[in-house]
Image (spheres, helix red, strand yellow):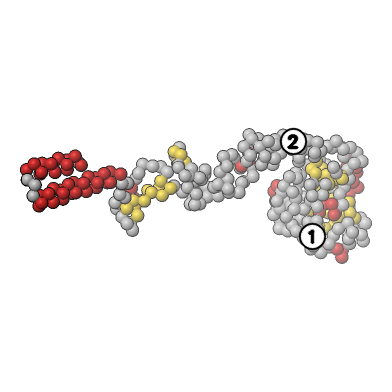
């Protein structure tokens, strides 16, 4: 276009002589041609203007990663990143298409997004770290807390099976296996799961533990726990946990001590089935014998019911469950 303007100027010079007015006219014509040329060039590089619309249907941009809508306030199309579950994180992919800037790996689940809490043993990737929650470190091994899991440490991809051997003698690959559980808060070693079941007399419970042979420790190394030792297993019920308000301890075993010992609501604990013990423990969520007899009634012994975390006493010929203990490691 600039060449066209130059040719036009030269033609005017050849036809019009050398008068001042003619010179001014030629200059003005050339300037106009330059302006037109600049306008055309600028327009060619500008982004397209927003598409005017009347309905959402007018705004389909054929990109599955955008939610297309007509902004009726401006009668122009808007294209927002898809966020189907409304959690504030745009989808990382839609219908097999990777979305630029998308972060939500499960855009149909509002509780799943980058940095979300993991769900133990879930096959979904709730925290969007690229691995299902049951294998959160991505080493190909499922957490030992899940069915058939063999990963002792699911936050460290370098720790899988057997890493606790020689450190925790209760482990056979993973620390809750091999017939016992070492409580890291007390260093007490517990039979896990309990093998003896229910005993209908306290003496039978005592005899069972005295003869127990498990996890490399034989007869004479295990015993029936005291009520204070049983209380160290309680989780999720502050009054009857070790050091809680309940007054029944090895040092206080009569009715004057029986206060604040009623436990908590049924099946509200962190263990499997709502049991009030550590989630790593296995066994029947029931009433367990202690070796602590009632100070005023020797034929009665204190027990702990892990279904509600209550502490009370019962006659020695009652039928209760047994979990043996020994000092560790």
Taking depth in this image into account, of 44 and 257 the one nearest to the observer is 44
Badge 1, how many Cα within 10 Å: few under 14, some, many 20+?
some
SS of the residue under disc 1: loop
SS of the residue under disc 2: loop
Q: Is residue 210 left or right of residue 245?
A: right
Please say whether residue 166 is visible from this viewpoint. yes
x, y (%) of residue 34? 21, 46
Quadrant containing the C terminus in the rendered view:
top right
Q: What residue is drawn where x is 74% and y is 38%?
A: 174
Q: Is residue 137 left or right of residue 204?
A: left
Where does label 2 land, which residue?
163
x, y (%) of residue 77? 34, 51
x, y (%) of residue 233? 79, 51
Q: Does the CB distance between marks 1 and 2 fall below 8 Å?
A: no
Give the foreground label among 1 and 2: 2
Quadrant containing the N terminus in the rendered view:
top left
Q: What residue is drawn where x is 45% and y is 42%?
A: 100
Where does label 1 land, which residue?
244
Q: Count numbered badges in the picture.
A: 2
Q: Is residue 287 left or right of residue 254?
A: left
């Amino acid at each position: 276009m600039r060449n066209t303007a130059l040719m036009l100027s030269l033609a005017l010079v050849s036809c019009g002589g050398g008068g001042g007015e003619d010179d001014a006219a030629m200059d003005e014509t050339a300037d106009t041609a330059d302006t037109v040329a600049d306008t055309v060039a600028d327009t060619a590089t500008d982004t397209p203007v927003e598409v005017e619309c009347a309905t959402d249907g007018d705004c389909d941009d054929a990109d599955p990663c955008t939610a297309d809508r007509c902004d009726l306030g401006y009668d122009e199309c808007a294209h927002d990143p898809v966020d189907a579950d409304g959690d504030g994180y745009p989808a990382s992919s839609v219908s097999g298409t990777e979305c630029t800037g998308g972060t939500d790996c499960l855009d149909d689940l509002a509780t799943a997004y980058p940095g979300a809490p993991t769900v133990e043993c879930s096959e979904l990737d709730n925290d969007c770290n690229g691995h299902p929650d049951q294998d959160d470190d991505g080493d190909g091994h499922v957490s030992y807390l899940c069915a058939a899991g063999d990963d002792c440490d699911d936050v460290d991809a370098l720790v899988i099976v057997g890493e606790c051997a020689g450190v925790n003698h209760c482990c056979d690959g993973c620390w809750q296996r091999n017939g016992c559980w070492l409580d890291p808060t007390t260093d007490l070693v517990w039979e896990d799961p309990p093998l003896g079941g229910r005993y209908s007399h306290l003496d039978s419970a005592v005899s069972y533990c005295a003869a127990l042979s498990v996890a490399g420790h034989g007869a004479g190394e295990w015993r029936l726990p005291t009520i204070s030792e049983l209380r160290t297993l309680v989780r999720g019920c502050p009054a009857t946990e070790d050091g809680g308000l309940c007054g029944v301890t090895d040092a206080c075993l009569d009715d004057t001590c029986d206060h604040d010992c009623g436990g908590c609501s049924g099946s509200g604990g962190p263990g499997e089935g709502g049991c009030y013990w550590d989630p790593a423990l296995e066994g029947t969520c029931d009433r367990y014998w202690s070796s602590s007899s009632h100070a005023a009634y020797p034929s009665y012994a204190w027990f702990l019911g892990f279904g509600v975390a209550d502490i009370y006493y019962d006659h020695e010929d009652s039928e209760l469950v047994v979990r043996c203990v020994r000092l560790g490691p």
